[in-house]
Image (spheres, rainbow, N blue to C red):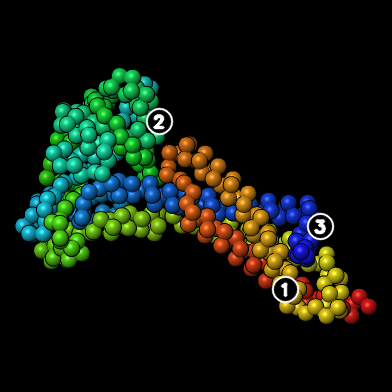
Amino acid sequence: MKTPLAWLQLTHEKVRLLVALAGIGFADILIFMQLGFRAALYESTTLIHQKLNADLVLISPQSEAFHLMKPFSRRRLYQTLGMKEVKSVSPLYIDLGDWKNPETGKIRSIMALGFNPSTPILDLPEVNQNLAYIKLPDTFLFDTASRPEFGRITELYIEKKQIETEINDRQIKVEGIYNLGPSFAVDGTVITSDINILRLFPLRQRENIEIGLINLQENADPQLVKTKLESYLGADIKIMTHDEFVALEKNYWATSTPIGFIFLLGASMGFVVGIVIVYQILYSDVSDHLSEYATLKAMGYGDRYLLIVVFQEALMLAILGFLPGFGISIGLYELTKVATRLPLVMQLSRAIMVLILTIIMCFVSGVIAVRRLQDADPADIF
């Protein structure tokens, strides 16, 4: 078996090869991290959305994102019960309160969700098993995946089975825990009954809710019912399917905040950095072997063969540089996940996409670098 010329040229200068692989690996790590942060952004900010048991969702037209919900009259939600396709409805109250760390006394903002515990609205077994507790006055369930600044709630709960602290200077008890996770907007959440959340925020009006959840009859088409409700309720209420509600949140972070654009820009910059690095390596390699290329031309090898050699080098660099970048990125994902508690995980689809981007990146560099081959004139060496 003949050793490919491209491989011999790459391995001839081992230090240069290692530098090239390090550069490509760095570019891949940058792309992996930015795409991972962007995915974690969308995943974390829609965690609650995905857990809601609802076919249709009602919100105020002025609402932009889950942490920025505007209240509307719950009477509008109950009006939907007049349609035969609607099986049940559930109002959801959302507000931000000041949580007091039970150990240090430090105050930190926390999101509170309140609903009627007689109707489970969340696909969270730990919450549904403890609905009886939140019927009690000033009793809450705490998200153990919240940021550690809220305190060692998991350890304290396992030890004592009940934690007493304060929210908005009101004495409350934690009688259960569940696992959901923070997001880029909210560091932690607690869940309680609608009555308790009204006690916690006495200036709130019971009539005003942030989200209305609608469950339909078994054979009802959500899209058709949505169209009927839009005509029935009018323009002062925004009606969405469950998937549209998730998409609304993602669209907010992608278009209405700079953070989504920044992550995408960071990935693009990693791609450009990779092109520059690979171009420098391939250009230097072609320049150093220009006389050899000219000799090959004199022996009868055409430009097509020489182009294939350069592209083979580009492909080898792409694959060899991707492997360490991929491995290091997995470790950085895990490190970041532990530090931030964000849902940052390596996905096969993302790995394949970055590999394809790496190959494209190296091929683009090869296309630019092969211009140097035009100077490989056999007449120059005879």
Indicate whether 298 appears above or below 75: below
Query: How many numbered marks appear?
Result: 3
Q: Is residue 135 in view?
A: yes
Q: Residues within 10 Å of mark 1 (few under 14, many from 20)?
A: some
Q: Residue furthest top?
A: 160
- Are dots 2 and 1 in contact, CB under 8 Å? no
Mark 3 or mark 1, which has the lower sequence index? 3
For the residue labelled by badge 1, is the local secondary structure a helix, a strand or a loop? Answer: helix
Q: Quadrant of residue 237?
A: bottom left
Mark 2 or mark 1, which has the lower sequence index? 2
Query: As drawn, is 212 to the left or to the right of 337?
Result: left
Q: Which residue is mark 1?
A: 307
Amino acid under label 1?
Answer: Leu
Q: Residue at x 68, y 64 (%)?
A: 314
Q: Which residue is mark 3?
A: 12
Q: Which residue is mark 2?
A: 149
Query: As drawn, is 97 to the left or to the right of 371?
Result: left
Q: Residue at x 71, y 72 (%)?
A: 308
For the residue labelled by badge 3, is the local secondary structure a helix, a strand or a loop? Answer: helix
- Measure the alpha-carbon separation of dots 2 and 3: 54 Å
Residue 261 got which mark?
none
